[in-house]
Image (spheres, rainbow, N blue to C red):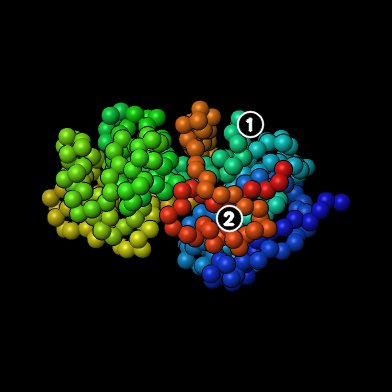
């Protein structure tokens, strides 16, 4: 008889520290086309907290288990499953709820991970590194030596942009809010790291020798996004994928009329929904290769067991962290 599992559950939207609880559930049984995955790691992303608060476009039916991202090991196969083997490390789909010890999931929705990759890193490849990969491939045809600029460069997605761009031969201008991040991001491979200010355009022009910047990546909004847009060459594109300042884009008419800038957005969940499995796997193969070579790595500030869920969630909600907060599950 398999033991019960622990799962994080919420029955109403609100402050995560208040509405989340841990409940015991029976060990999952796989349908014929499903497998049972025993979780190894699941991060706490801003989107997870927003979903619990009811401020995210994806609203699962309540009661729900949070967690858009995670990795685990296949421990049981449904009678019809032939595509994946017991013992495989897999990345889970984003609609399943990963903050629990184990779950049953359709085999066709899993992404198998090379065994050389640590479960903790595999658990964090699906959202931020994949967002970074799409940002660098889907909007502007960049060549080796081309410049791009991003704000929130110390975020998990921003660091992934630095790491991937460096491998592809693109040069990054990385905009941050705190002086103490400059050396750290330079050490990670950021070509230029600047503190955001009204003078950003002049500083950028100075450090790049006036080279054209055709891609801007915005995860902040408000004044920061405007500073970024002002650095871009005519006909360039700015892609928004976050709104950390909770401020709207304020783009002067002149940037549209005289510079013909294009403003786009990406929500990685929507990309997954629209991509075919071969398209997803092509991108994952590149991310796996970089991870195996040690070129792509997500920083972790602290890992917690699921039993310390309330402390972990409160920690993840704090600003000025040095890395991700993640749940690790016993093997």
Question: Toward which corner of the image does residue 158 lie, by quadrant?
Answer: top left
Residue underneath mark 1? 115
Rendered-image quadrant of the C terminus? top right
User: Picture quarter containing residue 309?
Assistant: bottom right
Residue 271 visible, this orientation: no
Q: Residues within 10 Å of mark 2 (few under 14, many from 20)?
A: many
Q: Secondary structure at mark 2?
A: loop
Q: CA distance from mark 1 to mark 2?
A: 23 Å
Instruction: Decide which of tag 1 and tag 2 comes sooner along the chain.
Output: 2
Q: For this rendering, which residue is in front, 326 or 9?
A: 326
Q: Is residue 170 visible?
A: yes
Which numbered marker is on residue 67?
2
Name the residue furthest right.
1
Q: In the image, which disc is placed on residue 92?
A: none
Q: Residue at x 27, y 45 (%)?
A: 194
Q: Give the residue displayed 16% in from the left and 48% down from the top.
A: 259
Q: Residue at x 54, y 29 (%)?
A: 292
Residue 209 at x, y = what percent? 17, 34
Q: Is residue 290 left or right of residue 191?
A: right
Left or right of residue 206, residue 118 in this image = right
Q: Furthest-front residue in view?
A: 180
Q: Tell whether label 2 touches label 1 (CB within 8 Å).
A: no
x and y percentages locating residue 155 in the rendered image: 42, 48
């Amino acid at each position: 008889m398999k033991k019960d599992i622990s799962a994080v559950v919420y029955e109403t939207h609100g402050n995560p520290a208040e509405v989340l609880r841990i409940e015991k559930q029976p060990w999952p049984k796989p349908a014929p086309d499903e497998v049972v995955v025993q979780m190894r790691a699941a991060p706490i992303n801003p989107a997870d907290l927003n979903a619990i608060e009811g401020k995210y476009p994806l609203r699962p039916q309540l009661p729900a288990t949070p967690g858009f991202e995670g990795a685990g090991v296949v421990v049981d196969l449904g009678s019809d499953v032939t595509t994946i083997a017991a013992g495989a490390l897999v990345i889970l789909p984003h609609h399943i709820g990963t903050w629990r010890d184990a779950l049953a999931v359709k085999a066709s929705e899993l992404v198998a991970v090379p065994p050389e990759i640590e479960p903790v890193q595999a658990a964090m490849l699906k959202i931020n590194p994949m967002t970074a990969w799409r940002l660098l491939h889907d909007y502007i045809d960049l060549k080796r030596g081309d410049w791009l600029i991003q704000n929130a460069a110390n975020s998990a997605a921003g660091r992934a942009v630095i790491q991937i761009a460096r491998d592809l031969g693109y040069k990054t201008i990385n905009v941050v809010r705190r002086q103490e991040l400059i050396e750290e991001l330079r050490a990670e491979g950021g070509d230029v790291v600047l503190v955001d200010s009204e003078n950003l355009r002049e500083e950028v022009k100075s450090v790049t020798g006036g080279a054209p910047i055709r891609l801007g990546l915005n995860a902040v909004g408000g004044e920061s996004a405007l500073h970024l847009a002002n650095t871009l060459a005519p006909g360039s594109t700015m892609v928004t994928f976050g709104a950390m300042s909770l401020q709207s884009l304020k783009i002067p008419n002149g940037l549209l009329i005289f510079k013909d800038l294009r403003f786009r957005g990406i929500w990685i969940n929507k990309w997954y929904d629209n991509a075919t499995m071969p398209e997803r796997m092509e991108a994952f193969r590149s991310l796996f290769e970089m991870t195996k070579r040690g070129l792509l790595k997500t920083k972790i500030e602290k890992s917690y067991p699921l039993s310390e869920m309330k402390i972990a969630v409160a920690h993840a909600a704090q600003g000025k962290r040095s890395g991700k907060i993640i749940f690790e599950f016993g093997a």
